[in-house]
Each structure stands twice: as structure tokens, then as C-alpha cells.
Amino acid sequence: MSGFQPGKNGFQDYRSKIHLDVDVCVIGAGAGGCAAAAALAESGLRVAVLEEGSHWEPRDFRQDTAFAFKNLYQGRGARTLRGNTVIPMPGGRGVGGSTLINSGICFRCPPSVLQTWRDEHGCETITNERFGAYFDRIWETLGVTVNPVAVQRNNNLIFKSGAEALGLDGRFMARSAPGCVGCGICQYGCPTGGKTSADRTFLRQALSSGTVGVYANCRVERCETVGDHVVAVEGHTIDPETHEPVHGIRVRAETFIVSGGPVGSPLFLLRNGLADNTHCGEHLVVHPAVGTLARFAQEIRPWSGVTQGYYVDCWDEGFLLQTYTVSPDQYFLLLQTAPGPETLEILADLSHVASAGVLVHDEDSGGRVRWTPAGPDLSYFMGEGDRRRIIDGLRLCAEVFFAAGATAVAPGRLGHRPVTTMAEIRAALPHDVPASHLPIYASHPMGTCRMGADPETSVVDPHGRVWGWSNLRVADASVFPTSLGVNPQVTTMAMGLLVGHSVAGRV
Ligand SMILES: Cc1cc2nc3c(=O)[nH]c(=O)nc-3n(C[C@H](O)[C@H](O)[C@H](O)COP(=O)(O)OP(=O)(O)OC[C@H]3O[C@@H](n4cnc5c(N)ncnc54)[C@H](O)[C@@H]3O)c2cc1C
Ligand code: SF4
């Protein structure tokens, strides 16, 4: 294939090396890349969006962990952080990026976080007015709504009853899933199309302009530069079955926007010497999270209903409690007990189990993404304060479950049996529990190409321009100067709009 082709292109269309010449090349079709493409398309720019994974339709998704990990997840679902504990860090792969596999939870970035970005990092483009308008647009584009009670079902309703009994500040979460029927498998791709992932919303807007071409199954690896200018990027088409490179691809453009996510973007910049590792790849924050399980006398059927529907707001204390459900085989993995009678007993009883967890606003933890000759090296060290906040959140989670009538609660400490009183929970979760005793999970990487006004302390300027390069930008969750403390997809899309509008000269 030679010559730019607007619309959807995929592996089946590629017969030989691809050469494209466009106005803007966007690398990565996740939350940030799709929003950036929509913003660019408004100005009639010719945009090629290159994405390593495939195009997906709702009918293609399967309730099958192995299928999802192979096709929709980075590193086939095995991506982890090392440090003072090992933390799984899943991420999406495909047109739609992590929005293909996320729970659709939508939060506007707290105003105090935006203010910190302006006051302490010099991000003067992030005004309340501009981001307020972006959040409104995202709400409308994604059809963000609170799903009805009939769709929420027991796992969310039981947690709500406990939170209300304790008088906590809880509510149903707004979600980008206006057509959700509560099938409970968001992490495998939404088979009903009820979730409005970025490919079904912002990218559709972009495609409808007729000036945007999306090239799925294309991985960008290298770039060619002259002076302070990126001239072209190169990579390969990727066989979706084997994940092996097949044909070459070369794209020339006036502007390049890297939207590979907080792992993919710094790796691309570092591998190509476009930024050094003083700040690029550093400052990784992830919203570390830990889940608990509770047993109820009544049926919960946690596999049914909105995957993540209810939360308790403890943002001022540094954490949120959020319900979650996963498929039965994932519960098996989460139990972290040795396979045997005890595990089988809990699994046989799964219809009576509810689950929720704590998500922490990283304050004294941090990590990095590095490129080494052996490949990517991802690390994260959990700070004392964040670890204590996890313990506080787990204790509160257990209290909510007991207030809702749980007969037993698993404290969320590896290998610890379920207990029946809060005294036992506190004993199981003293504040000095090491991070390695907690089954920590991290699905919100952020911050590895942080934005700022000072090239000495940041990777991109307040317009997303990589310091030192005239036509290279980053637009994804990696540009956040700090952690948010709330789920990040909406703020990522706002960053995509900002950078897209800036390239088009509208900011
Ligand atoms: C399981 C899970 C659940 C989540 N739930 C929620 C939620 O409910 N609410 C919420 O707000 N957030 C949630 N998130 C987080 C949210 O989805 C992400 O923060 C957001 O999608 C990040 O957007 P991004 O553009 O930075 O990266 P991504 O959306 O991850 O997209 C990056 C894309 O770039 C592609 N790419 C990378 N490198 C290259 C390359 N070299 N060449 C070509 N393509 C490349 C990748 O394949 C990927 O598709 C969840 C995340 C996960 C993993
Ligand atoms: S729970 Fe709702 S949003 Fe999630 S996969 Fe099922 S229908 Fe889609």
C-alpha cells in the first residue's frame, strides 16, 4: 500500500511497505491519541493514526481471559512493575487503547489538581475555563451517565448499603457506558457496544471528517530527524496472530504526536534519543489499588452487573473506595491462596462474594520507565505514606462490608484468611504491613513525560511540545505533572484535545 488512505486500514490491507505523507502523524490510538485526532480533524488536517493493535467491533470480543490478554493487553497481560513489591500493571493494546478494557468510570480532574499543574508546573494552557469546556465536550461525546439501579446489581448495591449505614460520602459513578446492560466483563472488551470507548466516539468523529486514516496493526519504532525537526517515523506492520513484524512502514509528516501511553511514549522517546532520562520515563505514578472480598449470606452473583459502579469519596484523605468485579477465573487469581481445598471452597461459594477496593493518590511513591538492552524495565517503589493510606482504605472497605451485613471479610493481605470482626481486620492490617504483603494492582500509569514550563524539570512544554524539538508532541496520560487521585481517562482525553487544538493553532 502506498499513499494515504482515509478511513480504517488494517493488516488485511497491507501487501508491501507502506509510505505515507500527511500533515500530522499520531502514534497510538488510545484515550489521548483518539481525542487528539478528533481535535485535528476539526481543522481539516490530514492525519494518519498508527496503532500497534487491531480494530475491534463489539461482536469480536469474547469472555475469555486468554483471548483478551493476547489480543487486547500490553505484554499479553503480563506487564508488571518491580520494586519493593511486584505490581501487575495492565494496559490496553488496540484501536481504543486502554479504553477498550477499562470500566468506563468518568471523573473530571479535581480543580485543585489543575491548579497545582498551573501554579507549581507552569502549565498555563490548563485553565479552568478550557478544561471545563473539554470535560463538558467529553461528557457529551461519550454519553457519560450514571447507569440505572437495575443494571448496577448486587455487588454495587450491597456496598452502597454499607456506605450509607456508616454515613459515608458515597454515590454511583458516572460512566462512559450509556448502553451498559451489566454483563460485568468490561476488562475483556464490551460485547454489547454499550461502553463508548475512544474508538467508538472520538475516533469516529475524526473519521467522519474524511481526512483521517487509522492504520491498525502498525508499530512505530524509529524516527529520522534533521536539526530540531522530526522528518519521518518508521516501523512495521504487525501480524495480529503472531505479533511478528511483516512489512515496513514509513510516515512523513509536518507534526508528530506520540500517544503511546505512559509506557509506550517515554520508551519511544528514550529509544530514539529524543529525550534523555533525566525526566523522560521518570515520575511514574499509578494509583496503586488493593481489593478485598466479603462473604454474604444472600446471593451477590458478582459476575453480574456494572463492573465498577459505586464509590466512597475519601479523596481528601488520599484515597477512594471503589467497587469492582472480575470474571470467576480472575477471582481465582486474586485469591492468591495455593490451589487446594480452601481455594475451591471459596470459589464454590463465589455467588455469595462481593468485592471492592481502595485506590490511592500517589503522594510519596514513584517509579520509572527505562529502556535497557534487554528491553523495557518498569519499576515502582511504594512510599510509607501511600502504604499507610492503602491500609486505612482497606480497613474502611472492611467496615463498609460489615455494615452491609458481611459474615466474613478477606482483609486484602496476601494469604490471609477471611475474618469476622473489625478487631481481626485491624490485627491483620497493622500500619507496618510491608508492601510485598499486599496484592497491589495498578491500571492507571501516568506522569512519565510530564508537562511543565521549565525544560530543566519537565519533558514537554504546556502545549505538549517535547523540549528541543519543533514538531514533536506528546498527548496522553504520560504528560500529567502529578497523579490525580481519580480515574484518569477523562483527563487524558482533555490533554488529547488540548494538544490537537494546539497543533491546529487554536490554543
Ligand atoms: C483494566 C483497566 C481499567 C481501567 N479503568 C478505567 C476507568 O474505569 N476509568 C478511567 O478513567 N480510567 C481507567 N483506566 C485507565 C485509562 O483507560 C487510561 O488512563 C487511559 O486510557 C490512558 O490513555 P493513553 O492515551 O495514555 O494510553 P492508552 O489508552 O493505553 O493507549 C495507548 C495506545 O498506544 C499504542 N501504542 C503504544 N506504543 C505504540 C507504538 N510504538 N506504535 C503504535 N502504537 C503504540 C498502544 O497499543 C495503545 O493502544 C483503566 C485502565 C485499565 C488498563
Ligand atoms: S458491564 Fe456494561 S460496559 Fe461493561 S462490558 Fe458489560 S455491557 Fe459493556
Image (spheres, rainbow, N blue to C red):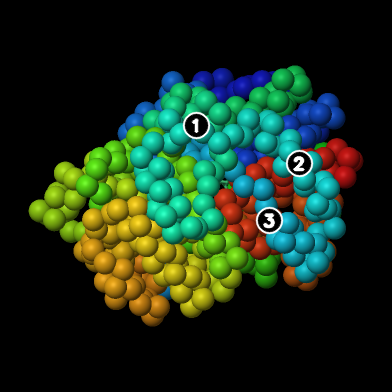
Label 3 crowding class (10 Å Cα cut-off): few <14, some 14-19, many 20+? few
Side (left or right) of 487 relative to 21 = left
For the point 30% across and 53% down, the residue is: 405
Q: Could you say whether the residue bearing mark 1 is in a helix, strand or loop?
A: loop
The residue identified by callout 1 is 148
Front residue of 83/442: it is 442
For the point 66% across and 63% down, the residue is: 482
State the image quarter where residue 481 is shown. bottom right
Quarter of the rendered structure image containing ligand 1? top right
Label 1 crowding class (10 Å Cα cut-off): few <14, some 14-19, many 20+? some
For the point 68% across and 56% down, the residue is: 110
Residue 486 drawn at (x, y percent): 59, 54
Q: Which mark is residue 110?
A: 3
Check disc 1 and give the amino acid type: Pro
Q: Is residue 443 visible?
A: no
Front residue of 172/36: it is 172
The residue identified by callout 2 is 134
Check disc 3 and give the amino acid type: Pro
Point out the frontmost of discs 1 and 3.
1
Point out the frontmost of discs 2 and 1.
1
Side (left or right) of 99 relative to 459 = left
Q: Earlier in the sequence, mark 1 or mark 3?
A: 3
Residue 419 drawn at (x, y percent): 23, 64
Check disc 2 and give the amino acid type: Tyr
Point out the frontmost of discs 2 and 3.
3
Q: Could you say whether the residue bearing mark 2 is in a helix, strand or loop?
A: helix
